[in-house]
């Protein structure tokens, strides 16, 4: 296992390379290019506040170039032989593995996410996404045969065209592969707009794709701010669909921006997910899962369970153990393999997360752990001590709003009906987690909870064929398995006559 020193050495070498290249550029039509405006923005690390790089700040002119390149390349890529397309996607997976050592430390320094998680993006999850969708390429075009007495109908799926992919800062590398792999497998070309707060690993990904022999223009990356580059991408007429992962309010903006060009949209948005623990659950396993699902990935995780809804009979005992575990979580430099929680993405987000400790207490909740920033060596970074509050109700702001940090709210219930009422009392509906040994009760809860994904007696364990997505204001559409192709492809029906049917005659 790589030590902190190994990771720091690797990071140093990556930063040296980045410095030598000067500015982080766009990648359009197979070439690294600066923004038309020549403007840049500074990307800093949440670990120590130091500058990582200047990044090109693109606008509608750069998006236009990328969209046109993607449109031109679409005519080729959609017709590339299935076997060849699959081989290229497999080579991308191999190249990602080749760069995995570089990806983990750079992403940790760029986002603050602990290396124990970021190292998996390059070594495991990114390549797995490409291989999984590569294997589905041939079946992706399949449709249905629906014969009638006088006609034979058959359908097929065809790629929708160039698509825009807009990703957030919390797990940038993994999320980009998760969106881009099925798009390419479907035969679409892409323009990727990475989050301005975590732009660094997007270029390694594009390089891995380029070196795999992907034709120029199939994969374009345009860096910039949401309200300029992001907005222009959602408005461009050559871009047929937008796959977006980010905040609910941004999703709403994108829907409006895309209205004039009738964009198809796929949204993976915010959450305020419940974990319901009954008194008959395996409480030791539930405790492990509750802690993991809120404090892993810095709590900056859309699927995290941020509301623990706990049965009154086990409340005191469970909360006592929970408090001990939360207070013991190791906060530190994300490049250290022992670190469990690293710094928040930036200062403003750190302040936002900390402000919720105050908001929670003003609302009547009791602070049990955290709610502060660590002092001493870590104060240069955007750290937040793992926070736990109890006595939360659905009427409080802390019971409603997404904090997106290492912050868990505990709520109490007595009956199944109460638990469901609390769980469903928010505008979000991404995931829910149910802990009970009573199988029938678990099924009733799974049926009644308003969420796109439910795990029973488990933390979030991702299985690529399953549908991933949220209900209510947590999203529109599903990813995973064939669901991804439903978004990136159009279904075309062909109706063929046997020559036996009547044709109505006019004008005789
Ligand atoms: P964000 O919405 O602020 O930004 C996401 C991306 O959208 C960035 O690339 C940004 O530049 C771009 N953007 C901003 N304004 C835009 C506009 N007007 N038009 C086009 N693009 C625009 O989100 P964030 O703060 O980066 O990420 C955190 C959020 O993402 C949280 O709410 C979290 O729950 C959510 N998230 C959801 C999932 C999921 O699967 N449901 C997964 C990860 C993160």
Image: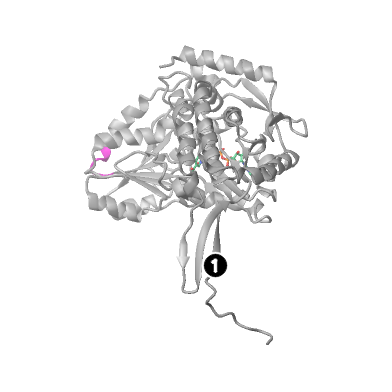
Q: Is residue 468 visible?
A: no
Dividing the picture into quadrants, the one containing residue 392 is top left
Q: Residues within 10 Å of mark 1 (few under 14, many from 20)?
A: few
Extreme-bottom residue of the structure? 508
- State which region is magenta: 311-316
Extreme-front residue of the structure? 499
Kindly identify the residue that appears in the image at 63 percent across and 39 percent down.
218
Residue 307, position as x, y percentages in the image: 39, 42
* Location of the N terminus (image quadrant): top left
Q: Secondary structure at mark 1?
A: strand
Q: Is residue 332 visible?
A: yes
Residue 435: within the magenta? no
Most foreground residue, 444 or 398: 444
Horizontal side, residue 69 vs residue 90: left or right: right
Horizontal side, residue 199 vs residue 480: left or right: right
* Location of the C terminus (image quadrant): bottom right
Splitting the image into four quadrants, where does ligand 1 fall?
A: top right
Kindly identify the residue that appears in the image at 50 percent across and 39 percent down.
178
Kindly identify the residue that appears in the image at 48 percent across and 57 percent down.
143
Residue 141, position as x, y percentages in the image: 51, 51
Kindly identify the residue that appears in the image at 54 percent across and 30 percent down.
345
């Amino acid at each position: 296992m790589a030590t902190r020193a190994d990771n720091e050495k690797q990071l140093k070498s990556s930063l040296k390379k980045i410095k030598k290249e000067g500015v982080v550029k766009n990648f359009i039509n197979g070439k690294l290019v600066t923004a038309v405006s020549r403007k840049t923005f500074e990307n800093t690390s949440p670990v120590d506040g130091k500058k990582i790089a200047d990044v090109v700040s693109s606008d509608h002119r750069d998006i236009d170039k990328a969209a046109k390149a993607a449109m031109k390349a679409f005519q080729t890529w959609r017709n590339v032989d299935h076997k060849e397309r699959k081989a290229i996607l497999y080579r991308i997976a191999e190249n990602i593995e080749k760069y995995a050592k570089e990806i983990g430390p750079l992403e940790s320094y760029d986002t603050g996410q602990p290396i124990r998680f970021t190292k998996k993006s390059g070594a495991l999850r990114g390549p797995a996404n490409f291989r999984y969708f590569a294997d589905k390429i041939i079946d992706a075009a399949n449709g249905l045969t629906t014969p009638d007495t006088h006609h034979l109908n058959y359908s097929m799926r065809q790629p929708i065209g160039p698509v825009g992919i807009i990703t957030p800062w919390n797990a940038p590398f993994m999320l980009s592969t998760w969106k881009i792999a099925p798009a390419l497998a479907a035969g679409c070309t892409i323009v990727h707009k990475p989050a301005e707060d975590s732009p660094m690993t997007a270029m390694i990904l594009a390089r891995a794709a380029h070196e795999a022999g992907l034709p120029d223009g199939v994969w374009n990356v345009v860096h910039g701010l949401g309200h300029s580059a992001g907005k222009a991408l959602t408005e461009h007429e050559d871009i047929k669909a937008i796959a977006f992962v980010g905040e609910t309010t941004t999703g709403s903006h994108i829907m409006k921006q895309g209205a004039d060009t009738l964009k198809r949209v796929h949204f993976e948005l915010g959450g305020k997910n419940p974990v319901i623990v009954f008194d008959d659950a395996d409480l030791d396993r539930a405790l492990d899962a509750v802690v993991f699902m809120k404090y892993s990935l810095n709590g900056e995780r859309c699927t995290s369970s941020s509301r623990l809804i706990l049965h009154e009979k086990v409340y005191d005992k469970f909360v006592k153990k929970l408090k001990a575990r939360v207070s013991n979580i190791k906060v530190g430099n994300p490049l250290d393999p022992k670190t469990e929680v690293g710094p928040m993405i930036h200062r403003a987000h750190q302040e936002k997360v900390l402000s919720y400790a105050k908001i929670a207490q003003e609302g009547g909740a009791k602070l049990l752990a955290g709610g502060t920033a660590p002092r001493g060596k870590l104060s240069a970074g955007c750290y937040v001590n793992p926070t736990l509050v109890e006595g939360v109700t659905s009427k409080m702001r802390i019971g409603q709003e997404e904090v997106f940090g290492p912050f868990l709210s505990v709520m109490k219930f007595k009956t199944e009906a109460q638990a469901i009422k609390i769980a469903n009392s928010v505008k979000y509906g991404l995931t829910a987690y149910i802990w009970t040994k009573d199988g029938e009760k678990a099924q009733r809860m799974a049926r009644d909870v308003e969420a796109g994904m439910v795990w029973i007696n488990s933390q979030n364990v991702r299985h690529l064929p399953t549908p991933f997505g949220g209900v209510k204001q947590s999203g529109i559409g599903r990813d995973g398995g064939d669901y991804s192709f439903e978004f990136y492809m159009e279904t075309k029906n062909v109706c063929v006559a046997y020559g036996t049917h009547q044709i109505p005659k006019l004008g005789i």
